[in-house]
């Protein structure tokens, strides 16, 4: 019977190290995917208005909003304050919402210095509800800018950061290019404004 010597010990150690390396590689976490670095915070209504206001007030350079229902005077005031701070504000509103206040809100926002457009007729409806701040954070969910949605309904939204915001911002840019600055008078017709 052969005796165990130093070469055998070195070979054994080498085999153990190779096995450990193979084991380590087998259980190494997968490389992160695009958008996987997203940071998420949850927001629920009733009572979400204060958090939405804080989100808007955090803007330093830009606020891009795509909103299905926008009837909140408090949100109009917040956007007015943002414009006064030098923040560029763009808003896309859905013209087919059955609400007599939609043209009033459009006109008020425009008069306050916001750039406002009516959503495209390319879609059956633009039912989106999101806000992008400084191209770095987005608030996306079911919360309309209405008193009911902000303070009384059960609504949910997520605030996201990271690479996922680029996707939301890209959707806004696509919809902005399709949107119309024309008055809502033609709403309900198949005018196909774009």
Image (cartoon, helix red, strand yellow):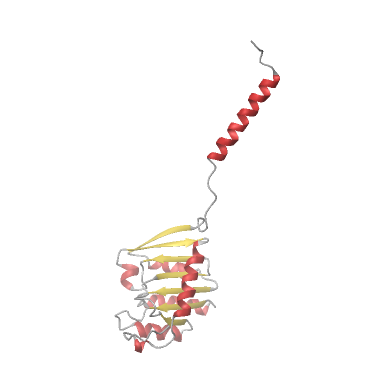
**In the rendered image, the vertical position of residue 131 relative to residue 39, given as above or below:** below
Looking at the rendering, which quadrant does residue 118 occupy?
bottom left
Q: Residue at x 42, y 74 (%)?
A: 66
Decide which of 3, 173 is in the foreground and name it.
3
Residue 62 in the image: x percent, y percent? 52, 74
Could you tell me if residue 28 is visible in this image? yes
Residue 194 in the image: x percent, y percent? 43, 83
Looking at the rendering, which quadrant does residue 40 occupy?
bottom left
Decide which of 5, 85 is in the foreground and name it.
5
Toward the front, the furthest residue is 1
**In the rendered image, the vertical position of residue 6 relative to residue 192, given as above or below:** above
**In the rendered image, the vertical position of residue 191 relative to residue 75, given as above or below:** below
Could you tell me if residue 80 is visible in this image? no
Q: Is residue 74 left or right of residue 167?
A: left
Q: Residue at x 49, y 74 (%)?
A: 173
Q: Residue at x 51, y 70 (%)?
A: 59
Residue 150 in the image: x percent, y percent? 35, 69
Decide which of 149, 174 is in the foreground and name it.
174
Q: Is residue 36 left or right of residue 48?
A: right
**In the rendered image, the vertical position of residue 138 relative to residue 182, given as above or below:** above
| Image quarter of the N terminus | top right
Looking at the rendering, which quadrant does residue 193 occupy?
bottom left
Residue 151 in the image: x percent, y percent? 33, 68
Toward the right, the furthest residue is 6
Q: Is residue 84 left or right of residue 154?
A: right
């Amino acid at each position: 019977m052969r005796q165990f010597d130093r070469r055998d010990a070195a070979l054994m150690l080498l085999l153990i190290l190779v096995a450990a390396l193979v084991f380590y590689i087998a259980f190494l976490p997968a490389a992160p995917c695009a958008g996987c670095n997203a940071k998420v915070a949850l927001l629920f209504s009733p009572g979400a208005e204060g958090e939405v206001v804080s989100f808007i007030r955090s803007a330093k350079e830009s606020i891009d909003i795509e909103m299905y229902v926008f009837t909140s005077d408090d949100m109009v005031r917040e956007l007015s304050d943002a414009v006064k701070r030098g923040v560029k504000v763009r808003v896309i509103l859905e013209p087919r919402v059955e609400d007599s206040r939609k043209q009033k809100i459009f006109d008020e926002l425009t008069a306050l210095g916001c750039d406002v457009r009516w959503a495209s007729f390319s879609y059956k409806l633009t039912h989106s509800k999101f806000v992008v701040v400084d191209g770095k954070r987005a608030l996306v969910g079911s919360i309309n800018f209405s008193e009911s949605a902000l303070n009384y309904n059960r609504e949910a939204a997520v605030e996201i950061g990271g690479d996922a915001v680029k996707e939301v911002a890209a959707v806004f840019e696509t919809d902005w290019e399709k949107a119309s600055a024309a008055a809502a008078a033609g709403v309900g017709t198949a005018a196909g404004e774009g």
